[in-house]
Image (cartoon, grey):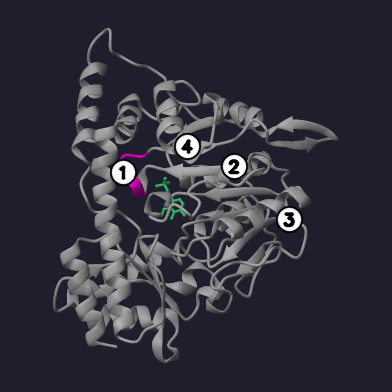
Amino acid sequence: MRLNPHLAAMPGGYLFGEIARRVQAYEPAAPRPIIRLGIGDVTQPLAPAITQALVDAAREMGTPEGFHGYPPDQGYAFLRRAIIDADYAPLGVGLELDEVFITDGAKTDTSALPELLAADARVAVTDPVYPAYVDANAMAGRLGHYEKGAWSRLVTLPCHADNAFVPELPRERVDLLYLCYPNNPTGTVLTQAQLARFVAYALETDTLILFDAAYKAYITDPAIPRSIYQIPGAERVAVECCSFSKSAGFTGTRCAYTVIPKALQGRVDGRMVSLNALWARRVACRQNGVSYPVQRAAAAALSPAGQAQVAAQVQAYIDNAHAIVAALQGAGLEVFGGIHAPYVWLRIPGGQSAWDFFDHLLHRAQVVGTPGSGFGPAGEGYLRLTAFNTAERTREALARILAVL
Ligand code: PLP
């Protein structure tokens, strides 16, 4: 059999696989329990309004009149309506029901959406970046060959302290630009004017922006855009991916959504085609959606009671992030992010490499972070800490880190 050469050419394992391997190898010898501030997984249990909806929907499924088979391709209308009313109407963004697609994860859709484009489309990402964007395009053969730590056809936009983590516009023509704000891994955000610059660029150059807003629940300043559609004209150039994972604790429950405005059009053989129609066609043939109980649970997260409960959970993570920033800054470290995001990006003191500093914290402090170089070459010299652990363990981890600096 002939296998996918692009998949076979992928470097190493997925970043978090390597971290898990190192932690597992060390754990039996660790003098005290390890505290994990590495992977971006939530720790609080599902909120009461959500579990109630899951239980009620499961019961309903066990009755003849309440049974639900395959869900509608784009998701149930009750959930799409709740998303439009709760997440977009308050921002002054009007959407129609068929512009929202329910999916099992933002990882799934941010990886799959490039299928809308030509097979040889040019892709641009920020560096550092959430690795799934790069991996998905690499295995689809869009990134060329991998040599000396870089993909030959991938356009990267370095983000570092000197440009305040705001990427430059791509210098060469690209078809697809991934933007993720609040950013994973740096925890930084874009102002309205900075995001508007990207939208203007995309309109001018006929570029599709894939805007990943998985962390929008962490924005506490109303002046910072929560949706790219708050920028006029974005509906003609941008797809937006959102998730219940980090806002409502759905990392294990699985529900997310993608917005594809009907105003968004691209060219096929010189004729204009709607991306919304193409994606609807693709969804219909590739997936059978998210289960009824989970869609009910997601809608419950958007109910008034659910919104209050999940806001309290998000606030607890934000408090952790602020505590991490304050403690590290107090120790004289240079830190970024962590204000409107659950991630803190710290500059490693003393010129150690990211993996060396990761090992140092693991072996000396029994704390797990994520080495910045795992998110791209521009992440070398940085370490990411997440705010998703409990307040108590976060405090303990900080005390341990400060003791070994
Ligand atoms: N997008 C970004 C930027 C993420 O950091 C993550 C998870 O860490 C995801 C998407 C995945 O979201 P989901 O759980 O909805 O697949």
**Residue at image location 33% in from the left, 80% down from the top:** 329
Marked residue nearer the N-terminal end (2 or 4): 4
Which stretch did the figure color magenta? Answer: 246-254
The amino acid type of the residue labelled 1 equals Ala
Mark 4 and mark 3 lie on one chain; the one further toward the N terminus is 4
Residue 333 in the image, given as x and y percentages of width and height: 37, 84
Residue at left offset 49%, top offset 67% = 375
Please name the predominant secondary structure of the magenta segment in the image. loop
Answer yes or no: disc 4 within 8 Å of ligand 1. Answer: no
Residue 106 shown left or right of residue 10 in the figure: left
Measured in 3D between alpha carbons, the distance from the residue under mark 3 to the one under mark 1, in whole angstroms, is: 34 Å
Q: Label 1 neighbourhood size at 10 Å, few (<14), some (14-19), many (20+)?
A: many
Cα distance between the residues tagged 1 and 2 = 22 Å
Numbered mark located on residue 61 in the image: none
Q: Which residue is mark 4?
A: 88
Q: Nearer the viewer, residue 139 or 313?
A: 313
Examine the rendered structure and indicate whether residue 12 appears above or below residue 398.
above
Locate residue 194: give its quadrant: bottom right
- Badge 4 or badge 1: first in the primary sequence: 4
**Magenta-colored stretch includes residue 248:** yes
Secondary structure found at label 3: loop
**Residue 239: mark in rendering:** 2
> Where does label 1 land, which residue?
248
**Does mark 1's beta carbon lie closer than 8 Å to ligand 1?**
no
The relative height of residue 158 versus residue 117 in the rendered view (above or below) is below
Asked if the residues shown at circle 4 and circle 3 are in contact, with their CB atoms under 8 angstroms apart, the answer is no
Image quadrant holding the C terminus, namely: bottom left
Q: Residue 56: give x, y in percent of width and height.
A: 21, 23
Mark with earlier residue (2, 3)? 3
| 10 or 95: nearer the viewer | 95
Distance between mark 4 and mark 1 Cα atoms = 17 Å
In the picture, the disc for residue 174 is 3
